[in-house]
Amino acid sequence: MSDFKKMLHQDVKDVFLNPEEFAEEHTICGKRVLCIIDKNSEADSKLSGIFGTFINDLTIYVQEGSIKVPKIGERISIDRSVHLVKNVSVEDGMIVIVAEANLS
């Protein structure tokens, strides 16, 4: 592993997932982990004729190895709320999960 990649992996713990900086503790699939959750709720215009329906998109950043990497289409629980995994990638020591849930 290059020195740069080693620094990136160290920054994941020391900066991005530092509870004094960005990270917060959440429960993902029954396991308490430090992560960053970026929330985006918006009306779903694709659901024509259905008023009051919103899509709750979450982008979750969690350290690689702290949870099992989910598969696209899998349902995962995040703080007791069930979400459908829309996309997942592993990037420089971080698992990045994009998930959604319907809210009424």
Image: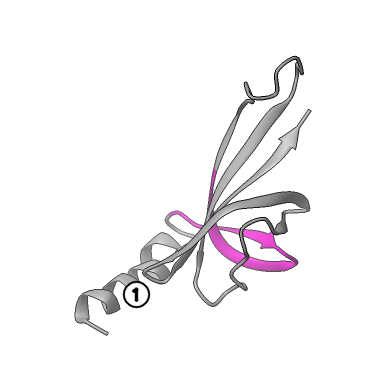
In the rendered picture of this protein, how many numbered marks are placed on residues?
1
Residue 26, given in percent of the width and then of the height, sits at 65, 58
Instruction: Assess whether residue 36 is covered by the magenta stretch.
Output: yes
- Image coordinates of residue 78 in percent, x first then y, are 70, 54
Q: In the picture provided, is 90 more to the left or to the right than 43?
A: left
- Above or below for 87 versus 47: below
Q: Answer whether residue 25 is magenta in the image.
A: yes
Residue of label 1: 10
Residue farthest along the bottom direction in this orientation: 1
Residue at x 67%, y 67% (from the top left corner): 32
Which image quarter holds the C terminus? top right
Magenta span: predominant SS is strand
Between 84 and 46, the one lying in front of the other is 46
Q: What residue range appears in magenta?
A: 22-38
The kind of residue on which mark 1 rests is Gln
Report x, y in % for residue 20. Answer: 45, 59
The quadrant in which the N terminus is found is: bottom left
Left or right: 103 as drawn, with respect to 24:
right
What coloring was used for the rendering?
Answer: one colour
Q: Residues within 10 Å of mark 1 (few under 14, many from 20)?
A: few
Residue 43 rendering spot, x and y as whole percentages: 63, 23
User: Could you say which quadrant of the image residue 46 lies in?
Assistant: top right
Element assignment for label 1 = helix
Determine whether 30 is above or below 56 in the image: below
Report the residue at 72% width, 64% height from top: 29
Asked if 61 appears above or below 32 in the picture, the reply is: above
Viewer-proximal residue among 30 and 96: 96
Q: Residue at x 66, y 33 (%)?
A: 55
Against 35, residue 54 (above or below) is: above
Answer with the quarter of the image where residue 70 lies.
Answer: bottom right
Q: Is residue 61 left or right of residue 86?
A: left
